[in-house]
Image: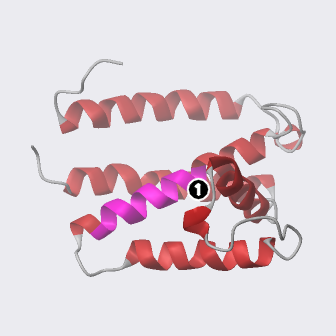
Amino acid sequence: METLKSKSELLRLMEDGRREWDAVLSQIGEGHLSEAGVEGLWSVKQVVAHVAGYEEWTAAFLADHLNPGADILAAHDAFWQEQLDVYRQDHPDFPANMNQTDDDQTNAVVVAVYDRYTAREVLDRERNAYQQLPSALQATPDS
């Protein structure tokens, strides 16, 4: 990937990628979103949940950096720690702290939480999480 030269270039690339993402998702009937096996054992719904989890974290990270003292990331991390505590009831082999989980373990917890929602709810949550990113990026100072 080439080095980005400006915030506006990054925003344009994000918009282009978002259009492609939405176009792909629109081709999949809602009834097929929960079918396993799209990426390993994961369904499209679970892939979208995975993306949403990272978008939410990135939005919280940016919000904290734009508003020092807001502790949005701390609230986000506390929520996921609570989710891990619940997940560990059925998976006691998982680390006790979210910051000790590896990528696969983190993904398992995120997907398990999103599995509680319908496919439509996951799509809506991901779209809402994404919408926070361009706004937060716009608010960052140019470098």
Q: Residue at x 65, y 56 (%)?
A: 106
Query: Is most of the magenta stretch helix, strand or loop?
Result: helix
Residue 141, compared with residue 80, is above or below; it is: above
Mark 1 highlights which residue?
A: 53
Farthest residue to the top: give it. Answer: 2
* Magenta stretch holds residue 28: no
Q: Give how far across and how far down residue 21 sits, in percent.
A: 57, 32
**Is residue 5 left or right of 92 when viewed as pictured?**
left
Residue 69 or residue 98, whichever sits in front: 98
The number of callouts visible is 1
Residue 3 or residue 33, whichever sits in front: 3
Residue type at numbered disc 1? Gly
Residue 126 or residue 96, whichever sits in front: 96
Q: Which residues are magenta?
A: 52-64
* Magenta stretch holds residue 54: yes
Residue 93 or residue 2, whichever sits in front: 93
**Is residue 92 left or right of 53 when viewed as pictured?**
right
Residue 22's image quarter? top right
Q: Give how far across and how far down residue 23 sits, in percent.
A: 61, 28
Q: Residue at x 63, y 59 (%)?
A: 101
Residue 18, compared with residue 69, is above or below; it is: above
For disc 1, the neighbor class at 10 Å (few under 14, some 14 to 19, many from 20) is many
Q: Give how far across and how far down residue 125 sits, in percent.
A: 61, 59
Q: Residue at x 47, y 79 (%)?
A: 75
Q: Secondary structure at mark 1?
A: helix
Q: Give how far across and how far down residue 108 sits, in percent.
A: 74, 54
Residue 74's image quarter? bottom left
